[in-house]
Amino acid sequence: MSDSVIIGLEIHAYLNTKSKLFCSCSTNIGNAEPNSQTCPFCLGHPGAKPVLNELAVELATKIGLALGCEINKEFFFSRKTYFYPDLANNYQITQYEIPVAGKGKLVLPSGKKVGITRVHMEIDPAALVHPHGMQDSNYSLIDYNRSGFPLVEIVTDPDMTSPKEAREFLNTLEGVLSFLEVLIPNTTLKVDCNISINGGNRVEIKNVSGFVAAEKALNFELNRQKKEANLNKKIEQHTRIFNSDTGTTIEARKKETEDDYGYIFDPDLTAVILDEDEIQRIKEEMPELPQQKAKKFQQEYGIGEYDSFVLCSDKLLSDLFEELMQKGADAVVSSKLLTREVLAVLNHDSLTLKDVEVSVGALFDLVELLKEKKVSDKNAKQAVINYISGDKTSPAKYLAKSNLLISEEIDLNGVVAKIFEENVSAIEEYKGGNEKVLNFLAGLVMRETKGAVSPQKVQELLKLKLDG
């Protein structure tokens, strides 16, 4: 009998504001000296009072609306009490009883609906610096520049049933957030992963950076729990951390309950009231979201459902596609180039479009070559690899310079004759009924010509000569 798996996620992200959540200190800390972007409130000085950043409330509300959540017209902040050096006040200002939004859902490309429990705001703690690494340092330094950064936390229902599905959710969520443009650019989402099997106690993996790491952490923890269950060991509720170098999780501490934190209303902050007019204004300013844009791409440009969802998984990718459409590029060829070749190269090198410079004009020229069947898919991909790797030569110029364009001048009959002469046994196999040999021979012809001939013409000529 297969194990039943239950996974829930808590995603933390930095809201894109110029100042912190409860003070005017800048969030643009860059290479600032430690503790230079602070004020009495950041440092927990007695008498320092918080002042709420209204833009942060608006951005969190946008996220709630995009996830189909119920927006609470009145909510407040609480103090989550715990004693640790990264909290100067010995409490974190967060939302507990009534968050900014709750009860929503996100539909994945697979059709699976994942419930959203809540969307709430909180402040980020300070950064602990271990001069000789966490294991080898006998003291730690504290940098309060980050203390008070506005965080949004998105908590899901425990609706996911595999690590792969959890990663699909995270990818889909990232697409929504990228379209909203509500997060600080070039920051990584942090994920707390909760997982249990067969109705047992859940284990939380804290503070995992990135989606690939989250999937790996969940896979390791799933296998660990299965082994424990097979040995009839009870899985206790506790917290673990993920070591990205070893791909393993290790126990950090026994899991606290909510009661352990002693939540109380923050007496320094009044309730936040959002009236209907304000919520309506935010709704009207909402951008087109990924699912809406994907349907538009299908209807206006005739591209497939899968390609449209992939294009809309990233705002920069969908923007690039729309710029190609504005230049009059072929929609189907463009979507195939972006979702197959360009993304494959980026993923292979662990890059995103934010990391590279891509010219729409250069891609347009490559789309035209593909449309006119002047370049093979294989050589087009090689041109993309060369272009994204940092070579400023456009794909079209690279293909021409490298003699990788399909040429009408190549003596295709002569090449086929040479291949036949060198592969007599393969020809006999084909005539004996093994039609798979045709693809083998076609591959040899393409290799001999460096892809500078039409694959379709190669197949047609081979069949003509073999069947004639």
Image (cartoon, rainbow, N blue to C red):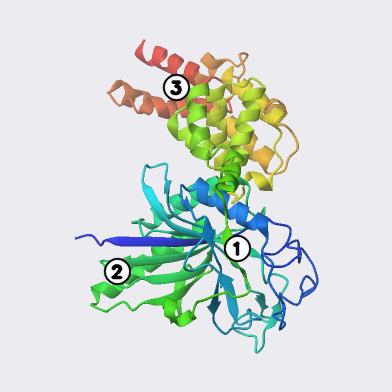
Check disc 1 and give the amino acid type.
Answer: Leu
**Residue at (47% x, 62% y) in the render:** 10
Give the quadrant of residue 304: top left
| Dot 1 or dot 3, earlier in sequence | 1
Q: Which residue is mark 3?
A: 420
Element type where label 1 sits in the image: strand
Q: Nearer the viewer, residue 44 or 178?
A: 44
Distance Cα–Cα, label 2 vs label 1: 34 Å
Q: Which residue is mark 1?
A: 151
Distance Cα–Cα, label 3 vs label 2: 55 Å
User: Where does the image place residue 465, in percent across and percent down from the top left?
Assistant: 41, 13
Q: Quadrant of the N terminus?
A: bottom left
Q: Is residue 100 left or right of residue 218?
A: right
Q: Quadrant of the C terminus?
A: top left
Check disc 3 and give the amino acid type.
Answer: Phe
Check disc 2 and give the amino acid type.
Answer: Lys
Q: Is residue 47 above or below residue 26?
A: below
User: Where does the image place residue 319, in percent across and percent down from the top left?
Assistant: 63, 35
Mark 3 Cα shell of 10 Å, populated few (<14), some (14-19), many (≥20):
some
Give the quadrant of residue 227: bottom left
Give the quadrant of residue 440: top left
Callout in the foreground (1, 3): 1
Q: Is residue 368 above or below residue 358?
A: above
Q: Which residue is mark 2?
A: 226
Element type where label 2 sits in the image: helix
Q: What is the residue that sits farthest to the top in this orientation?
A: 468
Distance Cα–Cα, label 1 vs label 3: 66 Å
Q: What is the residue that sits farthest to the left in this orientation?
A: 1
User: Where does the image place residue 343, in percent across and percent down from the top left?
Assistant: 56, 41
